[in-house]
Amino acid sequence: PRTNRPGLLDGLDPEQRAAAAAPRGPVCVLAGAGTGKTRTITHRIAYLISAGHVAPGQVLAVTFTARAAGEMRTRLRALGVEGAQALTFHAAARRQLRYFWPRVIGDRMWDLLEGKLRLVGQAAQRAGLGTEAELLRDLASEIEWAKASLVTPDEYPATAVKVQRDSPAAPQQVAEVYRLYEKLKNNAQVLDFDDLLLQTTAVLEEHGEVAREFRDRYRCFIVDEYQDVTPLQQRLLDAWLGGRDDLTVVGDANQTIYSFGGASPRPLLEFTRRFPEATVVRLERDYRSTPQVVELANKVIGAARNRPAGSRLRLIGQRPPGPEPKFAEFEDEPTEAAAVAARVRTLLDAGVPASEVAILYRINAQSEAYEQALAEAGIPYLVRGGERFFDRREVRQAMVSLRTAAGDPPPTELVTAVRSVLARVGLTDQPPAGGAARERWDALLSLVEVAEELAATVPGADLPRYVAELEQRAAAQHPPTVEGVTLASLHAAKGLEWDAVFLVGLAEGTMPILHADGDDNAIEEERRLFYVGVTRAREHLWLSWSLSRHPGGRRNRRRSRFLYGLLPEHHPAARVPRSQAARGGAKPKCRLCGETLAGTMEIKLGRCERCPSNLDEGLFDRLKEWRSARAKELKVPPYVVFTDATLLAI
Ligand code: ATP
Ligand code: MG
């Protein structure tokens, strides 16, 4: 055997080294964010190759996003590894299927389906359902969930009821659409993304000879971010293994953020049940973030409920201390965005490279305010995992309609005109509940807000003037550059890290997202997403939110529930409301958190309604239950001030 290349294990701590240098066979690394899981597996691959245990071509490492796979390839190259595959599940399956296809299916592999929604639309129509864009998108994601969960059309109705899916139509109807969609797709001889995994699995399961050849070729399997594996991906992984056990998995159950799409941390947490002889390593040392960021991360995830055994890990910061995380409340979203841009400018001036700064948000529609603010500050940026605001489909559609309408402007003062045009491209009065639908709605609403802003600042502004304003804004946006501040959704940020991270828009309704409210599992998934966000920061972490969406708007937003208990004890109440600042004079402060008290009830009690201590030991939940049982008689606002006597009564 070849000698080990010196240094391959040097950059690892003893636990990481145990995982990296474990003999062939099952290995499981269960550890929190920033503890070096990805580092450990890349070193493991390099080590196994250099020690002669496997040849580079026998290694197949998989993960979930193209960006993460790219990151893995970069790290492998840096370790001198050539020829080992690091791909997403889909890319790996596509490659394999293309290779097997002529041998077991025939001719050339079918093309990938384009225009999925059109096909779903045909299926929906035949099933007697409507074909509104929202419904079609929801049906498409429901079909994706079913395929990822290995649920057939026949099984769908019973399963949907059993797992309490929020089906976009009656379960029988969804099943019918699903069935018709599959049929239409097969007739057209095209494959969707899930088919790549399904077909590859089927080929390996049904064609022994092909499977043998495949298993001869690949001998060592590694999965990063294993907490987000779907049943379909697991089935493919099992087909790859074919009863062998050369599998290394790493993951963090606290970072499961795709369970709405069928992912589950169970295979990670139950790995040792399946492979009792596995080498299991737990990592606790956090090498990514300062102790300040680590402490905040521990608090965020410590507040999670129903954490499965095996996920209760604490992180121990290894880096020298850095700045305290900053919390800031703003009057409205543009003000928040401008303040963030100003902070970014300060960092850049202090020598932090733009590529080491990220602004992370919950939904892609939030990017607009930040794109605008960065563009105005002359700071280059790039948007990841989502399109730039003016490239969004619904925004482009809206622009077409607005331009047409501007050619023959209606006589109504501007905002009404804009609203009526946007109503035709899908802007409803009330926000829809669904995630993607809500994003599109928010994007359209942003266009109304531009109109409101214009109407307020330019008296008599008409539709053509408004369209000109939009076009100017679209043109002002910087084209994507390699060296720029990253704008990304929290989902797209998983596995990545930056020196400075801004978590923005931390208000109820956005983080957690509106439709998660009242659904405990959904809220916990939102909390994990927040945890993913906090743990992306190496050094600087800013958390901010605003009280209203646009300048002068109603201050009807509340800061995110996830911030309770995180603000430092004597946080200067973020910001004194303008009216009070103008009146001056000392205001009584909450005796627990030091926030300025508002309203007679708070002043009387000497503590604020949002104070963290009100939330200790589930009191808040008990109060919520108690209150909802008596909602009618009590007529209380959602966040009621309660006395110790009230609590005793619950
Ligand atoms: P996530 O859960 O967010 O994916 P992770 O556990 O995969 O995190 P890595 O990205 O592998 O963590 O590592 C986080 C950072 O810590 C990286 O910059 C990595 O290079 C560094 N790091 C990891 N282990 C060590 C170590 N033993 N010594 C020095 N730096 C380390
Ligand atoms: Mg990682």
Image (cartoon, grey):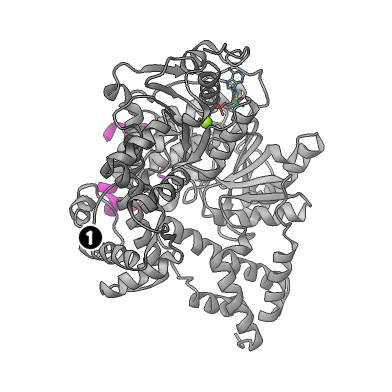
Q: Quadrant of the image for the C terminus?
A: top left
> In this figure, what is the number of numbered marks?
1
Reply above or below: 362 against 621.
Answer: below
Query: Does the image show residue 545?
Result: no
What residue range appears in magenta? 628-650
How many neighbours does mark 1 have within 10 angstroms: few (below 14), some (14-19), or many (20 or more)?
some
Query: What residue is rendered at 43% in x and 41% in y?
Result: 257
Q: Residue 395 location, x and y as percent?
A: 58, 68
Q: Is residue 388 in the magenta section?
A: no
Instruction: Identify the image quadrant of residue 236.
Output: top left
Query: What residue is rendered at 54% in x and 18% in y?
Result: 47
Q: Which quarter is ligand 1 in?
A: top right
The foreground one among 581 and 615 is: 615
The residue type indicated by label 1 comes to Pro
Q: Residue 89 location, x and y as percent?
A: 44, 42
Reply above or below: 72 against 166.
Answer: above
Instruction: Identify the image quadrant of residue 296.
Output: top right
Q: Which residue is labeled 1 in the image?
A: 171
Q: Is residue 644 in the magenta section?
A: yes
Reply above or below: 73 against 630.
Answer: above
The foreground one among 462 and 13 is: 13
Q: Secondary structure at mark 1?
A: helix
Query: Does the image show residue 535?
Result: yes
The answer to whether 255 appears left or right of 360 in the picture is: left
Query: What residue is rendered at 68% in x and 75% in y?
Result: 466
